[in-house]
Image: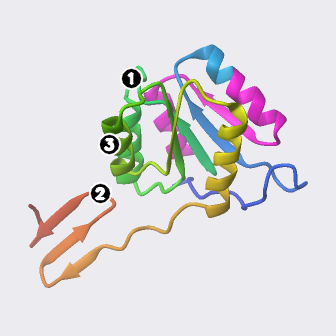
Amino acid sequence: MANAPTAQVPPGSGGPAMRVLVIDDEPRLAQTVQRGLELDGFTCTVANNGTDGLAAALDEPFDAIVLDIMLPGLSGYEVLRRLRAEQVWTPVMMLTAKDGSYEETDAFDLGADDYLTKPFVFAVLTARLRALLRRGAPPRPTVLTAGNLTLDPACHRVTRCDSEI
């Protein structure tokens, strides 16, 4: 799987550019975010629906993903759930118009690393992305085993004798 992140070098440091995948179905917003990130020294790829975004995230190495929730094809929640199920630990920032506490809680419970609501201040977006990149991708969660019982926190799965509970 080609999802290993590139070296952790801050944008503007003269090293390789950080690779960011933006998955958003609003073309003007996605282009604006792409241009702004590129001006700040990031390399940016845009996908305009959940299906293409998931494929890109699974096929190419990215240092961070900026993900909308309301997407055609697959929702941002489903993209995030599938990424984590495939053990892709790339940091994900949700960038969405959904500003309710339940939506934010759902995103974090599915594995999001940050959450920013639209409209947003671009300087805050880039600062939060830089913070995510400094922390890097989290290590793969440990699968806990006790006898024939296993708990996989990343996939939210519990099995006993290889049967899901």
| Mark in the foreground, 1 or 3 | 3
Q: Is 38 covered by the magenta stretch?
A: yes
Residues under labels 2 and 3: Cα distance?
15 Å
Q: Circle 3 sits on which residue?
A: 106
Residue name at image x 67 percent, y 31 percent: 121
Quadrant housing residue 159: bottom left
Q: Residues within 10 Å of mark 3 (few under 14, many from 20)?
A: few
Q: Which residue is mark 1?
A: 73
Relative to residue 38, is residue 126 drawn left or right?
A: left
Task: Give the distance between the C-alpha atoms of the residues marked 1 and 2, in whole angstroms.
Answer: 22 Å
Instruction: Tell which circle, 1 or 3, labels the residue nearer the N-terminal end.
Output: 1
Q: How far, Cα to Cα, is label 1 from label 3? A: 19 Å
Question: Could you tell me the amino acid type at mark 2?
Answer: Cys
Q: Position of residue 112 (x, y in %)?
A: 44, 48
Answer above or below: position of 107 versus 85. Answer: above
> Which type of secondary structure does the marked residue at label 1 adopt?
loop
Q: Position of residue 50 (x, y in %)?
A: 44, 29
